[in-house]
Structures are given as C-alpha cells and as structure tokens.
Amino acid sequence: MAHDSLYAAPPSGADTEREAGRLAGLRGALGTWDGAIVAVLVVAVLLASLSVQNFATGRNVQFLLLDLVPLALLALPMTLIVITGEIDLSVASVVGLSSTLMGQMWLSSGLSLELICVLVVLIGGVLGAVNGLFVTGFGLPSLAVTIGTLALYRGLSFVVLGDQAVADFPAGWTAAAVQTIPGTSIPAAVVPVLLLALVFGVVLHATPVGRALYAMGNNDEAATFAGVSVARTKFWLFVVSGVVGGLVGIFWTLRYASARGDNATGLELTVVTAVLLGGVSIFGGRGGLLGVVAGVLLLGVLRNALQLADVDANALTIVTGTLLIVSVVLPNAVADVRARLHRRRRRAQLGAS
C-alpha cells in the first residue's frame, strides 16, 4: 500500500464525489452573504491600497484599527440582540454617558482611576438593565424604548459635564489606550476585541444559548414552548450591551484623552449598519458573527479611505446611510429572487413528470 501511494492513481468514484463535494462547498461558501462581504472587503482593501495615498502605511493601519475598536465591541452584543429580533439604539449614548461620568468622578470624587473604571462598567450594566426592564418587563418595543433612552442618556451626559471637557487623565493611561503590540503597527486594544469576538462567536454558534437566540428571532412563542426563557435571555443581552458600552466609554475617553458629553454621537447608526451589512437580518433569526466582523472591517476601510481622499464628512454619513439601506433591502431581494426561481424549477419538474 505504501508503494502504491508513490504513483498517481486514476480518480475513483469516491474521489470524484469528494471533489464534487468540495467544489459544491466552495460554491456554497462564496454564495453566502458572509462570503460575499469578505470578497468585497478584500476588493476594497486592494483598491484603497492601490488608489488612496497613505492608506497602506503602518501608521494609517494603526489609526484604522483604533477607530474600529469601539465599533467592533459595540457590534458584538448588538449582533445577538438583533438576531433575537430586538435592537438597541442607545449604545452610543451609553458610551457618552459613561465617558462623562468617568470624567466627573475623576474630576471631583478623589477615587482611583482603577475604581472609577469598575464603577463605569457597572453603571453601563445598569443603563442596559433599564432598557432590558422596559423591553422584557413591560413588553414595550425595543425600538421605541432605546430611541427614548438614546435621548435620555445623551441628555444626562450633558447634565453631568455641561459643555465642558475633562482632559487631565494620567498620561500613562492615555498612552496605554493607543499602545501598539511591540514590533507591529497593530494596537494592543485589538487583542481583547478578538478575545471577546471569540467568546461571542462560541456562544452564538456552538452553545444551546446561541440556538435559543436564533429560535427567539424566528418565533418568540415557539421558543417559549420549547423551554427557552425569552424575557430573561433578552434582559441579560441588554445588560451585556450596557456593560460593553461602559467599556467602550472608558476606551473612548482614554484614547482621545477627553471626557465630553458629545463623545460617540451618532455611532449607533454605524454600529447597526455594520451588523446588518454583516448579514444579520433586521427581522431576527438569521446572521453570523463572521459576517459581522467582515462588515465592521468593510465599513471601517471604506470610511478611512474616503477620509484620506478628503471626502466631506457629510458624504461619509451618506455612504453609511446608503450601506444601511442596501444591507436591509438587498438580502431580502436576493431571498425573494431565490424563492421565485425555486418555485419555478419545482413547477417545471412537476410539469415534466
């Protein structure tokens, strides 16, 4: 048998079937939304590297990844929430309020920065719990609730600091927020983001909790009859979203060395766009974390390339809004076309028989 292995044997029927299976798997991967987004991301990076000056430099990669850290962190719990059929539009306001509370406590409380960071994360969890209580306890639509808390938390952030900014944080802390991995241009902050993405990915795709989230997104009542605690699960998802918002508030404050009431204003639109662009259905029940990560990177690359090309800031908002609409309309249009083609083939097969 070892001697025979030195020669190329003609393909057997089993080999042909395996090869056909691999090709079918490759076609299936490229035919998914995740595969399409990854392909578009690769094309966008290549085009930007070739056509936009300074895009492919190490310094720009560092700034690009630093810009993506808050977006990627907020997109992780948002993905799980949208898969259950809900949404959290208050995430950017949680970041802003967390930032101003951090600044105010540093300015006037006399507490250590370590303790302040812990308190800010806990407060973020409380802010998320308020959303979860209204959505699951009172049965209100998450869209309406989080639009309300978007305005409430943003308003409170201006009450805390007014139009002032706190900027005298320790230099060691602010430098650590933008520190790179030695010998590379990759910010060290990317490491915890990747670890959290791995945790969220395992929970979503490899645990009963993840399967329960998809079941809730497809049908709440059916999930309840199947033994899933829908209200409790959604409540904790909002709490997790608030905790992550608190973490992002700390990172945002230290990265820019500034606690202000308008920090992260409008970031919720970018987060939702990245999640939907990654293939998560706005109606719940569909989507995966790989596509969301690709969506975050694609959105970051596009915005970074346009900024380097001196495109107006208003145009960036237009691009984000357009991508948001495309990411909602296109998957549904593709699914509709596929369903029509499937029905047409079924009718043709029935007619032939």
Image: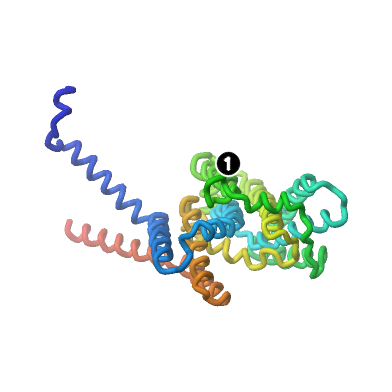
Q: Which residue is mark 1?
A: 227
Q: How many discs mark residues in the rendered view?
A: 1
Q: How is the image coloured?
A: rainbow
Q: Position of residue 87 (x, y in %)?
A: 60, 59
What SS does tag 1 mark? Answer: loop
Q: Where 348 falls versus 230 (above or below)?
A: below
Q: Position of residue 120 (x, y in %)?
A: 76, 51
**Placement of the N terminus among the 4 image quadrants:** top left
**Placement of the C terminus among the 4 image quadrants:** bottom left
Left or right: residue 168 compared with residue 240 = right
Residue closest to the far front: 183
Q: Nearer the viewer, residue 9 or 240?
A: 9
Left or right: residue 351 compared with residue 169 = left
Q: Where 94 falls versus 163 (above or below)?
A: above
Give the residue displayed 14% in from the left and 34% down from the top: 8
Give the residue displayed 59% in from the left and 66% down from the top: 269
Q: Residues within 10 Å of mark 1 (few under 14, many from 20)?
A: few
Q: Position of residue 324 (x, y in %)?
A: 51, 68
Residue 143: quadrant of the picture = bottom right
At label 1, which amino acid type do we have?
Gly
Tell me, yes or no, if residue 212 can be seen here.
no
Give the residue displayed 58% in from the left and 43% down from the top: 228
Tell me, yes or no, if residue 16 can be seen here.
yes
Give the residue displayed 70% in from the left and 62% down from the top: 93
Q: Nearer the viewer, residue 160 or 277?
A: 160
Q: Position of residue 126 (x, y in %)?
A: 75, 51
